[in-house]
Image (tube, rainbow, N blue to C red):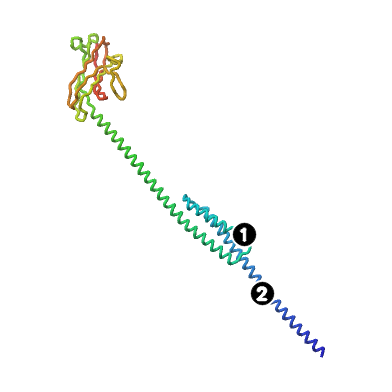
C-alpha cells in the first residue's frame, strides 16, 4: 500500500517537472523573441535617429548657403538656423529613443523644411526683383548717359552754330589800299617825305551784322616789326587781349556798304621798307594790305 503511494508521488513529480520544463522553455522562447524584437526595434530607432541627424545637418548647411541682402530675411534665417541647431543637439543628447520621440523630431524636421522652402521662394523672389531693379537702374543710367551725350552734342552744335553765326556776322573790309602822303597831302613813295599813311577800304554789306556805331582800328607794323603808335595807352580788345592800335575811326554801320579811310599821322621820319597794315572791328581782323616805302 505504501509502495503504491510512493509510486504515485514519483509519477506526479515527474509530470510536474515536465510541465515546469515546458513552461520554462516556453518562457525562454518568449523572452528570446521579445529581446530579439526589442533589439531590432532599437536598431531601427537608432537608424531613424541617425537619419534624422543627417537630415538636420543637411538642413543646417542649406540654411548657411542661403544668402540675401534683406536684413529682415537674414534675421529669420538666423532664427531658423539656431532652431535647427537646437533640435540637432537635443537629438544627439537623447538617451532613450522611442517611436514617439522619432515622430516628434520628424514633425519638427518637416516644419523646418517647409519654412526653408518658403524662405527660398521669398529669397528667389527678392533676387528676381533685385535683378529687375538692377536692370532698370542700368537702363536708366544708360538713358541718362545717352541724354547727357545728346545734350552735350546739342550744346556743341549750338556753340558751332553760334560761332558760325558770329563769323557770318563779321563785317569784312574789301578793296583795302594804303598810300603815303607828304605834308601837302600828295601821294609819295618816299619814306623820308611821308607825313601820313592813308588807308582806304569798303566795309561790306552784311544783313546779319549788328547795326550801329562802332570803331575800326588800324595797326601799322613797320619793317622793324614795331607797331607805329601815338601812345602806349591806345589799346583795343582782340582775342582776349589788349593790343596797341595806330589809328582808329568811328563809323555808323547800317548793314550797307560803307566807303571810308583812316589816317595815321607820323611824328617822325619813317624807315624804308614794307609796312603791314591790318584792320580790326568788333574784335575781328577784317582786312589787310601792305605799303612799300623807298
User: Please, what secondary structure does the residue beneath circle 1 have?
Assistant: helix
Circle 2/circle 1 CB separation < 8 Å: no
Relative to 103, does residue 216 appear above or below in the rendering?
above
Residue 141: x %, y % from top left: 38, 44
Q: What residue would you read off at disc 2?
A: 30
* Residue 247 visible to the viewer: yes
Residue lying farthest to the right in this orientation: 2
Residue for point 18% across, 9% down: 184
Residue 283: x %, y % from top left: 27, 24
Image quarter for residue 223? top left
Q: Who is closer to the viewer here, 107 or 49?
A: 107
Residue 221: x %, y % from top left: 28, 16
* Residue count near mark 1 (Cα–Cα under 10 Å), binned few <14, some 14–19, many ≥20: few
Q: Which mark is residue 93?
A: 1
Relative to 214, does residue 154 appear above or below in the rendering?
below
Left or right of residue 2, residue 121 in this image: left
The Cα–Cα distance between marks 2 and 1, rounded to whole angstroms, is 32 Å
Image quarter for residue 61? bottom right
Amino acid at each position: 500500500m505504501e509502495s503504491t503511494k510512493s509510486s504515485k508521488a514519483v509519477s506526479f513529480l515527474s509530470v510536474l517537472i515536465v510541465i515546469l520544463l515546458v513552461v520554462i522553455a516556453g518562457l525562454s522562447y518568449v523572452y528570446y523573441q521579445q529581446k530579439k524584437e526589442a533589439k531590432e526595434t532599437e536598431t531601427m530607432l537608432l537608424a531613424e535617429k541617425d537619419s534624422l541627424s543627417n537630415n538636420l545637418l543637411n538642413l543646417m548647411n542649406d540654411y548657411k548657403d542661403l544668402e540675401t541682402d534683406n536684413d529682415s530675411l537674414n534675421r529669420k534665417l538666423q532664427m531658423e538656423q539656431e532652431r535647427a541647431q537646437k533640435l540637432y543637439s537635443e537629438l544627439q543628447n537623447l538617451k532613450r529613443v522611442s517611436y514617439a520621440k522619432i515622430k516628434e523630431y520628424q514633425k519638427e524636421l518637416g516644419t523646418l523644411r517647409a519654412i526653408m522652402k518658403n524662405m527660398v521662394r521669398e529669397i528667389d523672389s527678392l533676387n528676381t526683383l533685385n535683378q529687375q531693379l538692377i536692370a532698370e537702374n542700368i537702363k536708366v543710367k544708360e538713358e541718362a548717359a545717352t541724354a547727357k551725350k545728346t545734350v552735350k552734342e546739342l550744346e556743341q552744335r549750338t556753340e558751332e552754330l553760334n560761332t558760325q553765326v558770329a563769323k557770318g556776322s563779321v563785317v569784312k573790309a574789301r578793296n583795302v589800299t594804303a598810300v603815303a602822303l607828304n605834308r601837302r597831302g600828295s601821294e609819295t613813295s618816299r619814306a623820308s617825305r611821308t607825313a601820313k599813311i592813308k588807308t582806304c577800304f569798303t566795309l561790306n554789306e552784311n544783313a546779319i551784322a549788328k547795326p550801329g556805331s562802332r570803331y575800326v582800328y588800324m595797326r601799322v607794323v613797320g619793317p622793324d616789326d614795331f607797331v607805329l603808335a601815338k601812345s602806349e595807352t591806345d589799346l583795343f580788345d582782340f582775342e582776349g587781349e589788349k593790343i596797341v592800335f595806330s589809328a582808329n575811326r568811328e563809323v555808323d554801320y547800317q548793314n550797307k556798304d560803307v566807303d571810308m579811310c583812316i589816317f595815321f599821322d607820323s611824328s617822325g621820319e619813317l624807315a624804308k621798307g614794307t609796312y603791314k597794315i591790318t584792320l580790326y572791328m568788333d574784335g575781328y581782323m577784317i582786312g589787310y594790305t601792305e605799303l612799300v616805302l623807298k
